[in-house]
Amino acid sequence: MRTNRTKTTSVAGGAILENGLILCAQRGPGRTLEGCWEFPGGKIKLGESPSEALRREIFEELDCTVQVLEPVCTTMYTYPFGRIALCIQLCRLIQGRPQRSEHRALRWLAPKNLPSLNWAPADRPAAAILTAMDQCFANHHHDHQ
Ligand SMILES: Nc1nc2c([nH]c(=O)n2[C@H]2C[C@H](O)[C@@H](COP(=O)(O)OP(=O)(O)OP(=O)(O)O)O2)c(=O)[nH]1
């Protein structure tokens, strides 16, 4: 298959925050970036906003519903298979619990521990920002209780 190196694929990822912890997901077998950690989500379809895409993808992949709270960052990254624009947004669960289906593993981590995982390269800036914002999430938790 011919790869098109100039096209940018837009991807939405959700940093789901609960009780001060963030949900991390490990990409499953047979997928690009197998074994790397990511924020659950997926490709944004034509006509969708990043938030709409995120709610849809998280419902499809994890069988739960999230509310999108605020953007964390957007990064551009060029992989050997193509360029992506990755939009990471902070979310919270409003219905259901994340159910693992296509991921190899799901893990809840304190923001300060995010750098301990082998993140997909495009996710590293978001993981670093979330780590730096650790103290804000402690406050955020209290706001919602
Ligand atoms: N969902 C998600 N994808 C990410 C993240 N970071 C990152 O580099 N990606 C990449 C992996 C994929 O190439 C693309 C998202 O596609 P996807 O999650 O819909 O994956 P997919 O299985 O449909 O795609 P593929 O393996 O068939 O390429 O963006 C992330 O945090 N979340």
Image (tube, grey):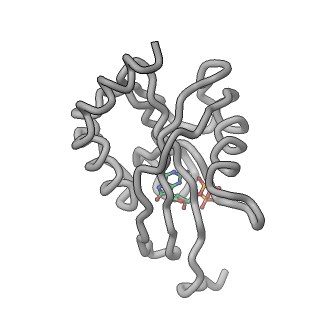
Residue 72, horizontal then vertical, whole percent: 41, 50
125 above or below 91? below
Would residue 102 appear left or right of 27 to someone viewing this image? right
Residue 20, horizontal then vertical, whole percent: 35, 23
Please tell me how many numbered marks the rendered image carries: 0
121 above or below 111? below
* The C terminus sits in image quarter: top left
Residue 96: quarter of image: top right
Q: Tell which quarter ligand 1 is in.
A: bottom right
Residue 42, horizontal then vertical, whole percent: 61, 53
Residue 70, horizontal then vertical, whole percent: 49, 45
Residue drawn where x is 67% and y is 41% of the image: 55
Residue 47: quarter of image: bottom right
Residue drawn where x is 70% and y is 28% of the image: 63
* The N terminus sits in image quarter: bottom right
Name, please, the residue furthest toward the right. Answer: 47
Would residue 78 appear left or right of 40 to someone viewing this image? left
Name, please, the residue furthest toward the top. Answer: 145
Q: Is residue 75 or residue 67 the one in the foreground?
A: 67
Residue drawn where x is 64% and y is 85% of the image: 2
Residue 75: quarter of image: bottom left
Residue drawn where x is 57% and y is 77% of the image: 8
